Amino acid sequence: MENTASINTWLENFKRQSLIRRALIVSGNVIDLSFSESGQLQPVNTTLNDTLKKQGFQHVVFYSRVGGVSGITPQQWNDLQAVGFQSDSTGEAYDVGDFDDANTGRTELTPKDFFSVAEQILLKSKQRVAFIVDWSNYLFGQVNSLSEAERAWLQQISRSLRDAELILLEQEVAKPQSLLIFLCSGQNALPPNLYLNNPLFAEVNLALPNRKEREKAIASLQYIFQVQEDLQPQSRALNDLVDHTDSLTIRDIYNMARLSRQQQETLSINNLVSLYRFGKRQSPWEQLNHDKLKDTKTTLQMRVKGQDQAIEAVNKILVRAYTGLSGLQHSSKAKTPKGALFFVGPTGVGKTELAKSLAQFLFGDEDACIRFDMSEFNHEHADQRLVGAPPGYVGYEEGGQLTNAVKTRPFSLLLFDEIEKAHPRILDKFLQILEDGRLTDGKGETVLFSDTFIVFTSNIGASNIKPSTPTQVAEQFKMEVQAHFQEKLERPELLGRIGDANIIPFNFINDDSILIDIARAKLRPLKERLMEKWGIKDFIFDDEVNALSTIVHSVNKQHGGRGVLNALTNQLFDPLADFLFKTVQHVDQIKHRTIRVVQAGKFFDFEIE
């Protein structure tokens, strides 16, 4: 049988500490399943019980405030409570309770009475007993407002541990000594003055299962899993499932195996994980197929005008990801984001628009583009807005804007606009996301970014770079970005994690035909809105090209596409709104009719046909 030490990383530490300490705090992932020394999957508390008995403890006694005492027979409990309790100061027998039901092996008693028994065993008995306080995170209230009873328990525990007999006999020191164990979800659930700087205590933390533990768990449950792939040892399918279960518990893996059996049709590994994690039967990344990728450039060019070089670069990155040659998809590091791009260029040239278009293309919904204006995160503690305030601080209950967004919508494009305006401390969070694919929020919950796509935008260097050829502009922008991260921010590692190939420069827009195309693209939603709200049949121009040319001539080209939208608003949208307000009192007056735009020089009038 395989050595348990190579599977349960915490168990060897627990065995070692249980033989030298008087008290242990076993915390962390304590509600999970674990492997026994014989290789059997079982609850953590069962593993603790079996291990302690193999260590030589005569009894392992579990206690909780609701469940009382369990793990020993009624007679064994009576024998333990009889130690040192011949009588109290009045000469009457001391009674801490009888078993309510001999069949359940449980008795109810107060914490004071339980700790009194443990104290007498620690002080007066040669028996080797391990007392496990189960669910001890529910034992004490707020640390700063403990009740008198809770303070008395702490004193009782501390005194019994401090005054326990010191074993110095050579033949005895290798044997177990009676032990008090607190089993809880987190060490901070216990008052710190109980264990801090106390050599009688040690903490054994149960982390989430590592890769080897998850692999063994999946192999152990292989007979339950029903997936399209064959989960044979050392197979690609098994490795993929192990990667996809990163940050999950063994109970999650067990639940996933049960879920696979409940489906009418056999799912692929990716779709099973997506269904378990997010409730979606199919991951959008599964739909990123060859036919869809053939139309990437055409789809993106419908909304983003004059940036064919940037669109071509995005297309290459998606193709690289699809073929598995970029490390962004189907890789051994499935936990990292699917992609990270850095859009840099002048303002108003389509960086944000391309990000929204990419979200629409990847996830079928422009709302999957979640935008963060990084100018709002320019102070030192702004990272708390992203991940949430720590316990005890204002806003703790609300969580973080970024972590909440990813928890709510795991399949999304995260757009960090004007990244150069963020405080450098924020950049460390991005480095963690790109490196590990996860963040821990203020509440201690780990949020995965493995199904997100990340886009940073910036106009670094835009004020210094003059319009020229696309190649020269692209090189200048790249140099400005590298200098900014290396010299000003001193964060070259972040740029290195994004990758030089993923820095995508955008060119200046100086061609009137491109500005006209942008204006024409902005007219499409106007026409759709008029049809939706007013029920019109059509919205047409006497001469659309001439009208749009007139509007474009008034645009400040340094403002790019944003300047086009401003000009459209001033010269067309506002006059149209004024016309509708003055002319149309009821929808029926315009329903199923056509609005015609009539140009008179630089001004526009409207007719209803």
Image: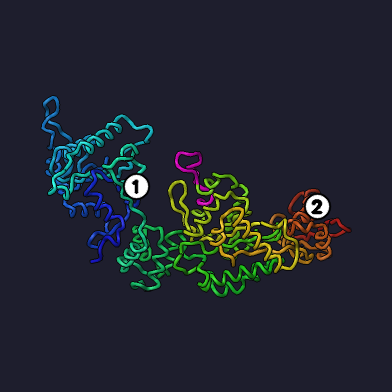
x, y percentage for residue 386?
53, 49
Q: Nearer the viewer, residue 365 or 33?
A: 33
Q: Secondary structure at mark 1?
A: loop
- Tag 2 secondary structure: helix
Question: Mark 1 packing: few (<14 Cα in 10 Å), some, or many (20+)?
Answer: many
In the image, which residues are magenta?
388-405
Q: How is the image coloured?
A: rainbow
Whether residue 298 is situated above or below residue 249 in the rendered picture: below
Residue at the disc numbered 1? 185
Residue sitting farthest toward the top: 90
Nearer to us in this view, 465 or 105: 465
Per the rendering, the mark at residue 444 is none
Q: For the residue marked with disc 1, what is the amino acid?
A: Ser
| The magenta stretch spans residue 373 | no
| Residue 391 drawn in magenta | yes
Quarter the N terminus occupies: bottom left
Does the image show residue 537?
Answer: no
Q: How many marks?
A: 2
